[in-house]
Image: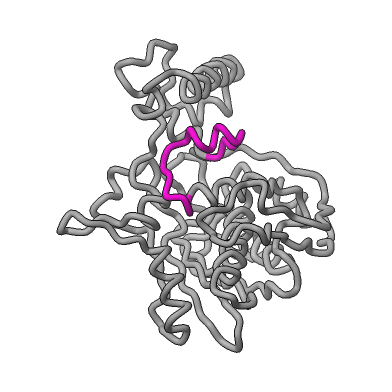
Amino acid sequence: MRQYLDLCEHILHNGTKKEDRTGTGTLSVFGYQMRYDLNEGFPLMTTKKTAFRLIVSELLWFIKGDTNVKALLAENNHIWDEWAFAQWVQSDEFQGPDMSDFGRRSQKDEEFAAAYKEQLAIFQDKVLNEPGFAEKYGDLGPVYGKQWRSWAKTDGGTIDQLKDVIESIKTNPDSRRHLVTAWNPEFIGDMALPPCHIMFQFYVADGKLSCQLYQRSADVFLGVPFNIASYALLTHLIARECELQVGDFVHTTGDTHLYSNHIEQVKEQLTREPKKLPTVKINEDVASIFDLELSDITIEGYDPHPRIKAPVAV
């Protein structure tokens, strides 16, 4: 994962200080590219422990076309909790303490952080157990899964981009149109969070499937390690579906940034030596990518350095 560490060094030395939507502030560069040969091992971060189970459950959530956090919570995955939680605390039905500006205040005010944690736990329980609550407050709008699996057409129909791209790879591997996009301008305002990883393209050569992701906004310390592993895994899954070997994963990013409250964590990570990459295993008894469950995908030989904690900018 030297490619990733080189990116961190590049931002620390060349980044421009910028303000951002969250109010946290960043060091940012524009336009960066990393390439990973997937035959050299699975690119799961080794200089800090990264939760592979969460990566898998989120990716399968996208693949199934789901947009409600209930399925993620059932897998003990809390990646999207804050954005769904915001919908509840901003509603007229919320009866708890003032949670406005909860993302930033929870990082600075211990009393507020405790109240925030308590209300978030109540929200999570309601999503899982209160009839109708998840339908009302757990849905994030037409985010990734919706665009991948049921892109809205003007005639009222939908397009299953993921199924279509798999069929395209199988029947016309040399096509330059193996594309899936999550950026749907008409519905950006209806999404709890506009997509950061907005478009990916597949490429077939010499019996190998490669994938390039374009990501408009890249949170380098917390988000990018997940993005790399998620799309590397997607490449493995699509290659398997299309009876191909894996090639490269190419990661191209736009606004590529380190949040100001992640700088010390990045410096700590840069003191660590990368370890041997693990391998990914997929249950051969499950034929279709659309039938895979969390237990069907495992990682072997993963021996990372310890986790490094950092706050999420919401």
Position of residue 151 relative to residue 49, above or below, is below
Q: Which residue corresponds to the image point at 58% horizontal and 62% vertical from the top-left? A: 287
* Boundaries of the magenta span: 62-79
Left or right side of 36 for 242:
left
Residue 219 appears at what percent x and percent y? 55, 52
Residue 192 appears at what percent x and percent y? 37, 40
Name of the residue lying farthest toward the left: 155
Residue 184 appears at what percent x and percent y? 30, 57
Q: Quadrant of the N terminus?
A: bottom right
- Between 94 and 62, the one lying in front of the other is 62
Q: How many marks?
A: 0
Q: Residue 18 in magenta?
A: no
Left or right side of 1 for 168:
left
Residue 51 appears at what percent x and percent y? 69, 46
Colouring style: one colour
Position of residue 62 relative to residue 254, above or below, is above
Left or right side of 55 for 96:
left
- Between 11 and 88, the one lying in front of the other is 88
Q: Residue 72 in magenta?
A: yes
Q: Which residue corresponds to the image point at 57% horizontal and 57% vertical from the top-left? A: 227
Q: Which residue corresponds to the image point at 60% horizontal and 85% vertical from the top-left? A: 207
Left or right side of 307 for 55:
left
Which image quarter: residue 7? bottom right
- Between 276 and 159, the one lying in front of the other is 159
Name of the residue lying farthest toward the front: 285
Q: Which residue corresponds to the image point at 61% horizontal and 53% vertical from the top-left? A: 226
